Amino acid sequence: MEELKARPVKSSSLTPLGFLERAATVYGDCPSIVYNNTTYTWSQTHRRCLQLASSIVSLRIIIKRGHDVVSVVAPNIPAMYELQFAVPMSGAILNNINTRLDARTVSTLLIHSESKLVFVDCLSLPLIIEAISLFPQHVNPPRLILITDEEISSTDDFHDTYEGLVEKGDPNFKWVRPENEWDPMLLNYTSGTTSAPKGAVHSHRGTTIAVLDGLIDWSVPKQPVYLWTLPMFHSNGWCFSWGMAAVGGTNICLRRFDATIVYRLIEKHGVTHMCGAPVVLNMLSNSPTAKPLKNPVQVLTAGSPPPATILLKAESLGFVVSHGYGMTEAGSIVVSCAWKSEWNKFPATEKARLKARQGVRTIGMSEVEVVDKESGMSVKRDGLTTGEIVLRGGCLMLGYLKDPVATSKCMRENGWFYTGDVGVIHPDGYLEIKDRSKDVIISGGENLSSVEVESVLYTHPEINEAAVVARPDEFWGETPCAFVSLKGSSKKPSEKEIMEFCRARLAHYMVPKTVVFKDELPKTSTGKIQKFELRQIAKAMGSPRAQSRM
């Protein structure tokens, strides 16, 4: 056996970029991208990406392959999709930036990544100009390329435009393949829902594993019709940007989420698949235009634990919901609620409860476990004993950019990635998230799950959104503070009524001691409620006992 070993013919580096080349061959005349009145085929998308990659190289801003960063600030439009391929095909590292960030944060990310080039959508141009104006004098600003939109008036005299680069490019360009599959391909900044954003760097190999893992786990067929309700700048749309090329899907692009528009596009294009955070399901279920679908639509949801109530509403309309768990550092979904056929005989409420669990590891992950914080040992599989969720697998990030301390803190020498999420393992082996470690409320020595309280709040008929965080309390240390937004009906419950509603369904120590009404809760662009911001508000409110003495 000694003579049988790895040879160059078997050692081609894994990369998802080659999926586009194959799509152009297999699905060349089939639609790849649909956006308003624009439709491209896979052969056209392949050619445009090659031309764009060629033009990026010609700008001579990429000095070192797999080292220099090119940023993109755009919604789910055709250019955004093409850039997921074209940027790394040029040898640069792709960095998608959240369009909803403020200028100061964007400025920080551009400086931290040392971005050489920024492709910016016309509506985000003022944001980027302001962000660059905040650069220190000694920092060179990146070059800007404007992405125009024929349906939106923009700066016509801008020197460098996206379509201009596409037109100038070489359609026969030999795209830059990675020398090593461990070479960096992506730089994705965390959402910052619990702390300052960190830059997770992903390799070609890890991304390829994440793409194939997602397609298999979600059972995505060939040539689906995929509606982009999940922002591509959020972990590259959970890697389905490359996944759709692998299966020859049709990408229905959507500049902004609007429930009415989503329902119209589902019917017009025969949408079969879409992704989104639970807030997307909530908005679709509560939309005035909501009505049962003519054909079922497969929906993959993740990003935060979805209340069973929301799952029940969505499925009653014809959305077939699959639930998963992932994070920026994992690249995509790494735990999914693998459905068992025997569960179909259960009542709808029980099925929704089971589906609200995060589930088991996807086949691309090596191991997923819940461990005790003190001992590091696996917790009991009783659905009650909490611990930190840890992961091990090939799609995890290489590490945080320029942050070895944070990298070593979460990627331990024992071979586990520590997520910071608190969960339990049920007797059947299925994982359920109980909270972020920073969101656990310790009241009178009792650990209180904010997710559990939120699930009860979501069952209230007049509550649209709910989030629970800790409020300082001189006696208890912390008490639960609920932030809620209400539906548009005339019935508006009082703080006391919501507390009584919770008291009838929760242990008394878990009942919110404060209820704050807001028109809308602050969220990231992917629909995650920004508890970091709500915690600051609750902290500023101070202890109610201290206030009563004033």
Image: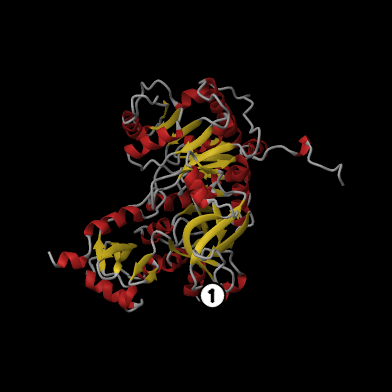
- In front of the other: 286 or 303: 303
- In front of the other: 146 or 332: 332
- Residue 405, percent across and down? 48, 45
- Residue 402, percent across and down? 48, 38
**Residue at numbered disc 1:** 382
Residue at 42% across / 48% down in the picture? 191
Residue at 58% across / 66% down in the picture? 339
- In front of the other: 300 or 94: 94
Q: In the rendered view, tell whether residue 500 sits above or below residue 410.
A: below
Q: Residue furthest left?
A: 550
Q: How many marks?
A: 1
Under mark 1, the amino acid is Asp
Q: Is residue 456 visible?
A: yes
- Residue 7, percent across and down? 79, 37
Relative to 542, is 24 on the left or the right?
right
Relative to 217, is 517 on the left or the right?
left
